[in-house]
Image (cartoon, coloured by chain):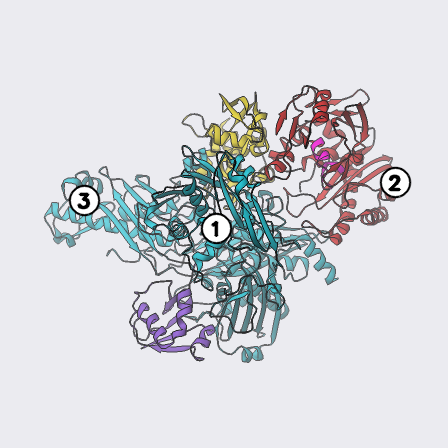
């Protein structure tokens, strides 16, 4: 079975890899590019731990084939911080203890960032439904929702 | 597995017609990849149709009808204000499929061709009278979407045939549609029962209606008795009772891990009432946002 | 102050809320979890699993898989040690684990491992599995606990029953517990109202988001390295060594960051298999479970069938209580029947009480510990009956619980007398909480429940090493599941008197620290915390010795204050305070490096209680339930890092909500698991839950230097009952079976009329 | 002498007694003495027991001193999740 050559952009950097057509974008990010921030929690698009952006659109990278990334722009948790400055969501998640084990955190940060870019002033209900595809088993979501809401507020005030 | 990304539907059809073994078309991939990953279906040939021009387009035609490319995602539909204004029920049904992440990829056509009786968008499309263009080795044909799924995981598409576009009728005046489903959580579940209502008013009186049910039979049902129960009425309590009874009577569900026969039958009636009220209000010009869950 | 005193106030660091030391790693994707490891030349493993609930394995032919070029090793049971002895009950636990990680002559449940391969890619390994031929003789199966106890049930394994089970019971009943005191018959006779009822709960999975994953290397020299996500790497080391027939010390195990465990990662599943593959292929092997494998083949909790009988006087006094608890723990002994029985009535001061637990085997995966194993289901049954007694007698549920509450000196339902406990304080806090008096909307109901868990100490080793610049590194052996590095650093800072940020806490591997029990039993902040405090005090003793030597005064004339050695009183001499960093700066020339150590099995884990208040709303037309308000009140002894204590409270409540409303293992008639994906195993999502309020009660535990009680587990004990009581109130009908799914609620409403 | 309270499930192994007396000054000696007096208690002790001394739970330790007159209970081994 021959492999397919893929040229794509990850967090702004041009990258290339060879993949079996059965391999997912998540497999390629983790195994070929060593970007292990996105996690596989389910492989069926139900947990959101593998969340990335594909041409700016939030997706589960376990539901995208590696070959489909050809010519696309991919954003992962590794690209959220700006150099040595954390994204406000990252800092707030630390400040609020919005994580316990941390396995869902990369996916939630990618998803929450996508939300705030689209809706800078979400209601609690909007945050909860936007993040319904990001399972967290540790926190009961309370501190996560507060962290996202308060980051949104800070970012609005900073503008 | 061979991966192809043809440049036209004719080419896609040729590839599929010539392929041996299992063939799947890849649009949003949110069902195909799950089945691949779980070793349920590993296609021998996978045909990615997203590079075909026009598959990401939402077009309003001169007569007010809509043509949707087969790779338009749920999120793109939800962000299209004019489409939402015309067909809020179809859009809200599609937007209930999966998470925000899944919405970034999942498509109406995929939801249709997956053949699940519980697919959220299908009752809404059936109620709306959506048709599909099917491209095959012998050219194109146009069919009602309800004729494509023939049972769980099965479709009426012949070898080499691929859905190449969807068409939603012109909305017209004084009309509204809506979709609700029942799930145990607030999100992320497969519908235990789904119900769509599409209706038109003449003054306060319902002049036309289409009522469809999902997850209560091997395929989505268009329930003519339920429509008849409300046509000619102002959706008064008696009409709603008749509607609920007709919806429940049409159910031919099974007991499974997601619900019982008894539960599905009863809740189909409950949902029909609730959905009809929303569709009616929309037909009266009220803006009612899509419901979660 | 003497170094061994109990300190409960005037803390400088303890009780503050600094950022966790591993926060940056975890928000940037840099933290390395189980599946994030890679080794040069690494192979990928995959496991073939039984599609049958119960089947004799007649033949396994691996030759076609082995013939593939990409396949480097195939293993079956024959590749593991044959020196692991079988024994009844829990005595033969290594054998049970071995049998679970790789089937012997029978497949005992859907998903039971029967063979494994290692190949050059994950896809090649999966493809190779399809070429392994297994010939099965399908046997009758049973997956329900009550059916498994009936005379006609198929026998899962002869000889598994231990000493405790009376003659005449079905061989699937493998252990029995009975305890209590007083005369229950006399007690029931004194009651004004006796309620007897039957309750069931389904098996639920811990549901951690990170599937089990490991990277194993085992050479022909019998020396190995293992990286894995686990709650305790020493138990992994010990168990894998036994199962592979190598010496424990020759296997070095490193714990990755762990993506949730909740009890489910306290044992091994894939680790011995990866090691066996590596030994055979002589290459590193990475093995990662799929989500479906996690559900099918790792431990959910037990399901339960329970009979409860409680008698009460009109004034609310409980006169007698009796419970029969049947726990289904899968195809091995270990269902936590004794804990269910012992926890059931622990919150109450009872003159007459009797509890019986049965551990029953079925054709399901081997149960694993899940957060206060056994206790939540007991609380569900018992607290439901108490709620019903209050309803029928017109009594206030908080007052009745206060009237009967266990206190210091109460003879516990399971035997001994309680030391200082905080149940009454949680009930008083509940009574005073605005939630309890807030108005309810139509269709809503309110429920409360108490809950109890023992907590645990366990083997613990901690080393603390000071650096020349006055910073400190702390090596602990309990994987950090929910922010424990922060708690350890706070406790070390408190003793040493140096800034929190100058302390780095590392989870040491098995080769660099003495034995540590698993991160379970809510023991980490208690036991590793105690050991960290004592290791720091050990270092402080040495620091004081150096100061004494420098000042030329006796060591007992030096005390440690605010990070400095100071003379202990005016008679000791007049010396300026000597900061820690001044002592460590030249420690190499004043006696050598300064470290502190502590190794022990601390035996003072205080038991813990909680009271929860829940408001739920039921849609009477569909049976759909929504939790609209939730308050957790729990005794933490002393909250070292209150934010992470709140996090444990909230997480336990959320898991309890899932268990109560939607989560369950669903088996078909064929004995196969029908919902092995998150789509259909429905854990709570963000939009299902309200904010979860918390109240931290602090009744110091005399067994910890700062008064800590474990908090991780007790938080899941009250929710099932509290929610059931709220839903029953909202629906107007008593819900006796979990989960309270919409079809169940709707049919209960219908039956009720 | 230490009075050891057993859980009632053990009565079958002690000829019906739920409280037994043995000579011991710590938990380890106590367990040995129990087995000497009632050999059938070996199985439950091997399967794992904890001891409480005046309400304090000793999960597994064999060296915990037992003061005179202490209230002592044998319990099934306490673990956690």
Q: Secondary structure at mark 1?
A: helix
Which image quarter: residue C387? bottom right
Q: Position of residue C143 (x, y in %)?
A: 60, 58
Viewer-side label of 2, 3: 2
Q: Chain of mark 3?
A: C
Q: Nearer the viewer, residue C411 or B144?
A: B144
Q: How far is mark 2 from mark 1, CA to CA?
A: 68 Å
- Mark 1 and mark 3 residues within 8 Å of each other at the beta carbon: no
Instruction: Tell me the magenta residue range.
Output: B109-122
Q: How many marks?
A: 3
Q: Which chain is red?
A: B
View extreme (left): residue = C552
| Chain ID, mark 2 | B
Q: Element at badge 3?
A: loop
Which mark's residue is nearer the viewer, 2 or 1? Answer: 1
- The answer to whether dots 2 and 3 both sit on one chain is no
In this rendering, position of residue A67 left or right of residue C278: right
What color was chain D assigned in the picture? purple
Q: Is the same chain shared between marks 1 and 3? A: yes
Badge 2 marks a residue whose secondary structure is loop
Mark 3 sits on what residue? C577
The picture quadrant where one finds residue B225 is top right
Callout in the foreground (1, 3): 1
Chain letter, yellow: A
Instruction: Please state, as top left, top right, bottom left or bottom right, where the C terminus of chain C lies in the image.
Output: bottom right
**Res C38 seen here:** yes
Where does residue A153 sit, x and y in percent of width and height? Answer: 52, 33
- Residue A156: give its label: none
Q: CA distance from mark 1 to mark 3?
A: 65 Å
The residue that label 2 is drawn on is: B231
Residue that mark 1 sits on: C77
Left-right relation of C657 to C545 = right
């Amino acid at each position: 079975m021959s492999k397919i050559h893929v040229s794509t952009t990850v967090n702004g950097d041009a990258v290339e890899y060879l993949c079996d057509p059965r391999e997912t974008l998540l497999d390629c990010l983790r195994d070929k590019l060593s970007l292990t921030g996105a996690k596989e929690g389910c492989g069926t698009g139900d947990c959101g731990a593998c969340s990335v952006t594909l041409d700016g659109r939030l997706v589960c990278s376990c539901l995208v084939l590696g070959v489909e990334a050809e010519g696309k722009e991919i954003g992962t948790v590794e690209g959220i911080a700006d150099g040595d400055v954390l994204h406000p969501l990252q800092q707030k998640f630390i400040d609020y203890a919005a994580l316990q084990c941390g396995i869902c955190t990369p996916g939630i940060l990618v998803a929450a960032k996508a939300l705030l870019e689209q809706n800078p002033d979400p209601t609690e209900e909007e945050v909860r439904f936007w993040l319904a595809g990001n399972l967290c088993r540790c926190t009961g979501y309370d501190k996560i929702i507060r962290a996202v809401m308060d980051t949104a507020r800070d970012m609005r005030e900073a503008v | 597995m061979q991966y192809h990304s043809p440049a036209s539907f004719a080419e896609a059809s040729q590839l599929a017609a010539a392929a041996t073994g299992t063939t799947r078309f890849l649009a949003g991939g949110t069902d195909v990849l799950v089945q691949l990953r779980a070793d349920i279906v590993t296609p021998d040939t996978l045909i990615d149709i997203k590079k075909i021009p026009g598959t990401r387009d939402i077009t309003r035609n001169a007569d007010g009808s809509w043509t949707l490319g087969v790779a338009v995602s749920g999120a793109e539909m939800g962000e299209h204000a004019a489409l939402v204004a015309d067909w809020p029920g179809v859009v809200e049904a599609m937007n209930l499929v999966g998470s925000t992440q899944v919405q970034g990829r999942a498509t109406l056509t995929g939801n249709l061709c997956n053949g699940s009786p519980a697919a959220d968008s299908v009752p809404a499309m059936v109620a709306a009278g959506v048709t599909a263009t099917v491209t095959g080795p012998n050219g194109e044909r146009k069919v009602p979407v309800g004729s494509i799924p023939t049972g769980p995981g099965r479709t009426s598409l012949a070898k080499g045939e691929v859905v190449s576009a969807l068409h939603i009728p012109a909305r017209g005046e004084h009309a509204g549609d809506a979709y609700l489903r029942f799930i145990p959580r607030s999100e992320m579940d497969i519908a235990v029962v789904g119900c769509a209502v599409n209706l038109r008013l003449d003054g306060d009186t319902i002049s036309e209606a289409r009522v469809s049910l999902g997850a209560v039979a091997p395929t989505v049902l268009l329930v003519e008795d339920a429509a008849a129960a409300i046509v000619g009425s102002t959706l008064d309590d008696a009409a709603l009772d008749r509607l609920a009874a007709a919806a429940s009577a049409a159910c031919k569900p099974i007991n499974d891990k997601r619900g019982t026969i008894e539960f599905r039958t009863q809740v189909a009636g409950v949902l029909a009432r609730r959905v009809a009220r929303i569709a009616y209000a929309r037909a009266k010009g009220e803006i009612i946002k899509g419901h979660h869950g | 102050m003497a170094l061994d005193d109990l300190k409960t106030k005037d803390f400088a660091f303890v009780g503050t809320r600094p950022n966790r030391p591993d926060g940056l790693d975890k928000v940037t994707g840099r933290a390395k979890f189980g599946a994030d490891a890679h080794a040069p030349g690494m192979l990928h493993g995959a496991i073939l699993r039984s599609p049958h609930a119960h089947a004799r394995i007649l033949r396994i032919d691996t030759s076609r898989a082995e013939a593939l070029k990409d396949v480097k090793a195939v293993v079956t049971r024959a590749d593991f040690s044959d020196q692991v002895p079988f024994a009844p009950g829990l005595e033969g636990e290594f054998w049970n684990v071995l049998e679970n990680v790789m089937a012997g002559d029978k497949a005992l449940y859907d998903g039971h491992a029967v063979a494994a391969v290692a190949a050059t890619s994950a896809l090649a390994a999966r493809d190779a599995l399809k070429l392994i031929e297994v010939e099965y003789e399908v046997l009758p199966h049973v997956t329900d606990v009550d059916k498994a106890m009936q005379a006609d049930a198929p026998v899962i394994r002869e000889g598994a029953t231990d000493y405790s089970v009376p003659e005449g019971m079905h061989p699937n009943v493998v252990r029995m517990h009975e305890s209590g005191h007083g005369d229950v018959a006399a007690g029931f006779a004194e009651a004004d109202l006796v309620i007897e009822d039957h309750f069931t709960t389904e098996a639920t999975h811990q549901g951690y988001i990170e599937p089990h994953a490991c990277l194993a290397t085992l050479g022909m020299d019998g020396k190995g390295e293992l990286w894995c996500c686990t709650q305790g790497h020493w138990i992994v080391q010990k168990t894998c060594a036994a199962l592979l027939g190598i010496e424990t010390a020759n296997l070095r195990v490193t714990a990755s960051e762990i993506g949730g465990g909740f009890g489910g990662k306290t044992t091994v599943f894939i680790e011995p298999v990866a090691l066996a593959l590596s030994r055979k292929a002589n290459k590193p092997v990475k093995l990662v479970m799929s989500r479906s494998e996690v559900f099918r083949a790792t431990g959910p909790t037990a399901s339960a069938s329970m009979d409860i009988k409680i008698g009460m006087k009109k004034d609310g006094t409980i006169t007698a209580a009796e419970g029969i608890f049947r726990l289904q723990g899968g195809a091995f002994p270990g269902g936590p029947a004794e804990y269910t029985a012992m926890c059931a009535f622990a919150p109450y001061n009872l003159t007459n009480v009797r509890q019986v637990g049965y551990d029953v085997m079925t054709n399901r995966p081997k149960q694993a510990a899940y957060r206060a194993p056994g206790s939540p289901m007991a609380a569900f049954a018992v607290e439901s009956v108490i709620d019903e007694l209050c309803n029928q007698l017109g009594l206030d549920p908080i007052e009745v619980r206060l009237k009967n509450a266990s206190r210091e000196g109460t003879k516990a339902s399971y035997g001994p007398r309680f030391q200082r406990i905080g149940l009454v304080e949680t009930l008083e806090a509940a009574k005073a909480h605005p939630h309890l008096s807030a108005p309810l909307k139509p269709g809503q109901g309110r429920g409360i429940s108490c809950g109890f868990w023992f907590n645990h100490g366990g083997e613990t080793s901690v080393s603390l090493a000071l650096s020349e610049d006055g910073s400190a590194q702390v090596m602990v052996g309990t994987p950090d599941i929910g922010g424990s590095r922060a708690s350890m650093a706070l406790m070390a800072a408190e003793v040493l008197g140096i800034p929190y940020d100058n302390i780095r806490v590392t989870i040491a591997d098995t080769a660099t620290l003495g034995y540590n029990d698993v991160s379970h039993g809510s023991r980490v902040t208690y036991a590793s915390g105690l050991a960290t405090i004592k290791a720091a005090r050990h270092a402080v003793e040495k620091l004081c010795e150096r100061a004494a030597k420098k000042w030329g005064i006796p060591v007992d004339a030096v005390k440690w204050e605010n990070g400095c050695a100071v003379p202990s009183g005016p008679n000791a001499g007049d010396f300026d305070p000597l900061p820690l960093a001044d002592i460590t700066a030249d420690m190499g020339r004043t006696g050598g490096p300064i470290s502190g150590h502590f190794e022990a099995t601390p035996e003072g884990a205080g038991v813990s209680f909680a009271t929860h208040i829940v408001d739920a709303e039921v849609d009477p037309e569909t049976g759909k339930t929504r939790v609209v308000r939730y308050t957790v009140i729990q005794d933490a002894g002393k909250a070292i890092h209150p934010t992470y204590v709140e996090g444990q409270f909230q997480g336990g409540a959320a898991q309890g909500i899932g268990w109560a409303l939607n989560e369950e293992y669903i088996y078909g008639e064929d004995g196969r698991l029908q919902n092995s994906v998150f789509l259909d195993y429905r854990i709570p999502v963000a939009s299902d839950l309200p904010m979860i309020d918390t109240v931290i009660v602090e009744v110091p535990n005399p067994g910890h230097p700062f008064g800590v009680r474990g908090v991780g587990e007790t938080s899941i004990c009250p929710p099932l009952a509290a929610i059931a009581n709220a839903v029953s109130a909202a629906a107007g009908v008593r819900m006796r079976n979990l989960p309270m799914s919409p079809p169940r609620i709707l049919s209960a409403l219908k039956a009720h009329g | 002498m230490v009075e050891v309270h057993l859980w009632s499930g053990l009565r079958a192994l002690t000829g019906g007694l739920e409280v037994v007396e043995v000579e011991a000054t710590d938990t380890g000696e106590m367990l040995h003495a129990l087995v000497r007096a009632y050999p059938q208690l070996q199985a439950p002790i091997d399967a794992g027991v904890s001891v409480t001394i005046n309400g304090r739970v000793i999960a597994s330790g064999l060296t915990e001193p037992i003061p005179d007159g202490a209230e002592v209970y044998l319990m099934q081994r306490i673990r956690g999740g």
